[in-house]
Amino acid sequence: MARAPSGIIDADSGETHGPRPVPVWDDESRQSAIAAAETVMRAYARPNLGFDEWWAQLQPLLDQKATADYAYMDPSRIIATTVTGPAVITDDTSAYVAFVDVPTNAGTYGVVLSRADAAAPWLAGRFILPEGVN
C-alpha cells in the first residue's frame, strides 16, 4: 500500500512541505553568519559601480524586505569602499537572526542577517551606518 506523504500539501502548487530544520548556534552557524556579513558588506560597499551592476551583485544576498528597501538606493552615496577586518557577531539571541559588526574604511557597519531555517542561507535585512554617519 502506498504511503501518504508526510507534511503539509500546498493548495496552490500541490507540493508537500515538511518540517523545517531548526537552527542552532554552533561553530558552523557562526562561521556562515560571519562569512555572509562580510560577503554582503563587500557587495554593498561599492560606490563606484553603476546601479545595475551593484544591484545585480547585492540583491541575491538580501532578504525580501531589504530587496524592497534598497531597490532604489544610489550606491554612489555609500561611504565605505573596503572591508578592513573580520566581522564579529554582536547579538546571537535568536538562532534565526544575527547582528554582525563589519569594520570598513568608513567605520564599523552593522549588518542584520536572518535565515528561514537551519538549511537556509543567511540573508541581509539591514545595514546600520557607522556611528556619527547619517
Image: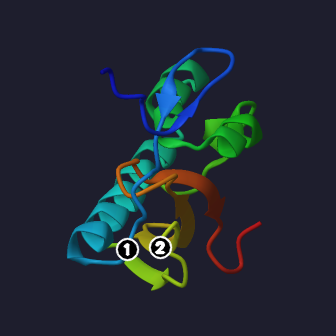
- Compared to residue 35, the image places residue 47 above or below, namely above
Name the residue rendered at 74%, 35% in the picture: 68
The answer to whether 68 appears left or right of 63 in the picture is right
Residue sitting at x 77%, y 66% = 134
Disc 2 target residue: 95
Q: Residue 55 vs residue 103: left or right?
A: right
Q: Quadrant of residue 35?
A: bottom left
Q: Which residue is mark 1?
A: 24
Q: Quadrant of the N terminus?
A: top left
Furthest residue in direction left, as rendered: 27
Q: Nearer the viewer, residue 12 or 91?
A: 12
Query: Which percent across, then down, holds residue 103?
Result: 42, 73
Image coords of residue 126 (percent x, y):
64, 57
Q: Nearer the viewer, residue 113 or 93?
A: 93
The residue shown at (49%, 28%) is: 16
Upstream in the sequence, badge 1 or badge 2? Answer: 1
In the rendered image, the vertical position of residue 54 relative to residue 99, given as above or below: above
Q: Please, what is the three-letter code of the amino acid marked with disc 1?
A: Val
Identify the residue shown where x is 37% and y is 64%: 33
Does the CB distance between marks 1 and 2 fall below 8 Å? yes
Mark 1 element type: loop
Question: What secondary structure is marked by label 2?
Answer: loop
